[in-house]
Amino acid sequence: MAKITIRMKSEGAFLPQADDDMIVCRCEEVTKGEIRRAVCEGLRTFGEVKRYLRCGMGLCQGQTCQRLILQILSRELGTPIPDLGRITGRTPVRPVVMQELSRSTEDSKGVEDHALS
Amino acid sequence: MPYHNHTEKKSADVIVIGGGVIGCAAAYRLAKEGVSVLVLEKNEICSGASGRNAGGVRQSARDVRELPLAMYGVKHIWPALSEELGVDVEYTRAGNLRLGRTAAHLEKLSELAENSSKVGLDVRMVTGGEAREICPYMSADVLGASWCPTDGYANPLTTTIGFYKKALSYGAVFITGITAIGLGKVKGRVRNVYTDDGVYEADRVLVCAGYASRAIVNTVGIDVPVEREDEEVFVTEQLPPMFDQVLGTAEADFYGHQTKHGSFLLGGVSGLQHFTSNHDGHPTEAYTAPSLVRGIIRFFPSFAGVKIIRNWSGQFDSCVDGVPVIDNAAEAPGLTLAFAFTGHGFGISPSVSIALKELIMDGNSKTIDVSGLKYDRFAAKQ
Ligand SMILES: Cc1cc2nc3c(=O)[nH]c(=O)nc-3n(C[C@H](O)[C@H](O)[C@H](O)COP(=O)(O)OP(=O)(O)OC[C@H]3O[C@@H](n4cnc5c(N)ncnc54)[C@H](O)[C@@H]3O)c2cc1C
């Protein structure tokens, strides 16, 4: 069950850090500073930050950045990592072309030669 | 610890149940007027349908009872919403093409177009050739389409979070991880909200918790014929900008558009969705994406080689007559209802929030006509 979290207007101003330009999510090019700023503006879980900034939504679905993001959020919020929620791994785990997916019936015959150029 | 605040806050002028786009937008409008607002959300902000939908901002083929909300938003709110919220909501108004491949499709589309134009919306039928001029990627099989140039799309994630952040900045308080279980009256007025974290109190309660709303309002004797329905969406790899129109088909084979990000957001149902709604959570069905993909390739053969990156499902609150309830409940004074959006609550959410603000603060919705969306309109067939 989700942890009870109270959210109110942020008291503190955003405090920049030297490595804010560091890219954390490489697929969607989201930086550490963007994640820290989102927290300052009121976002509280990994899922919320993902929806807002797209980090973890790219081709790898967060395989690389997930742990880094959780660590940044945990440090910013003083919240233990298990309380920050998770993002959901989605099918297909690897990108799949539509033509492959469509092949479960006779219906898809004849679409093979139409790759998008 | 600047971000922690464990002050107990168990009462407010208005309690909002549900932190989706409707709850966040209503909280923003009310907090902006100086009303103290407390939003109770079971999971995370934007974790329900608002975080899973396809972002269509559509007026065409809408029920006329809902059209005033849809048209008001497109005219007066969406164009400047990014500036209003300080977040890019990616609103794009480049039209909606609803495609047909048979004479029967075209007949159905003309009827829908005629109904909408009767109430003042610019929707017209175009030929297959004209449709391909607007959007050159579609198959030669497309015989015609309905065309509404003022339809569009926006990003539901940044829109919902934008409303949430703005509501916070005006002093609204949100508590996540709390489940509302029921309501209770004090001296004839709805005042108590019973939760898994004790009793919360307010002068007014707004219930906008999607399909879960029914069970909550049932506790004070209000019922709305609404049930859960599953729908799926998937997203493709990023592609170079191709077109800005939102697409749909007469038979609802699929719908979708290219996002600002470059990926296409495409969604729909398999036709078996009414029989999958007994699952907990948000499962995707193995047969849904393939079924949607077959529809897409039929209309857009060149998409056969495009990669799908992620597929998810969402649940919406399907009403027996296809439009939401947006009303104050007379038998339960203090209670305002905003649910049963039936899979099209995102596009109208900015307008709905204005109607809700007025219903809650003034007792009626003056700016936008919601008189067709009353909670007591349901009756058995005669
Ligand atoms: C796949 C899909 C595609 C769609 N496409 C479109 C589209 O293109 N255009 C469009 O306009 N609309 C679309 N919709 C519909 C749209 O997403 C919804 O109508 C809209 O998001 C409704 O917002 P909401 O805030 O009412 O609901 P939700 O976002 O579902 O919010 C309700 C919230 O209430 C919370 N909650 C539930 N029970 C409780 C409880 N007991 N206590 C506290 N909180 C609770 C939930 O966790 C949830 O966060 C689509 C929907 C789906 C599922």
Image: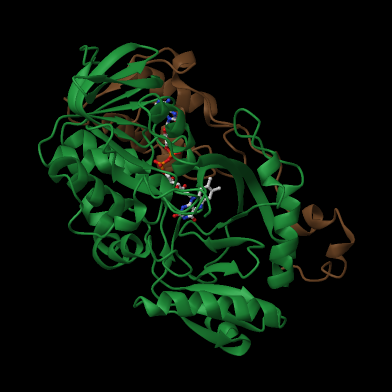
Which residue extends farthest left?
Answer: B34
Residue at image point 29% right, 56% down: B371
Place residue B195 in its image quadrant.
top left
Place residue B57 in its image quadrant.
bottom left
Q: Is residue B55 above or below residue B36?
A: below
Relative to A28, A117 lies left or right: right
Residue at image point 48% right, 70% down: B244
Residue at image point 23% right, 55% down: B83
Residue B239, percent from left and from top: 58, 62
Colour green maps to chain: B
Q: Is residue B146 above or below residue B48?
A: below
Evaluate whether residue B77 shows in this view.
yes
Relative to B272, B207 lies left or right: left
Q: Colour of chain A?
A: brown
Q: Quadrant of ligand 1?
A: top left
Residue A95, percent from left and from top: 70, 47
Residue B360, percent from left and from top: 19, 40
Q: Is residue B155 above or below residue A88?
A: below
Along the viewing direction, whichever of B373 and A46 lies nearer the viewer = B373
Residue at image point 65% right, 76% down: B105
Residue B8, percent from left and from top: 22, 11
If the image is split into quadrants, where does the N terminus of chain B sit?
A: top left
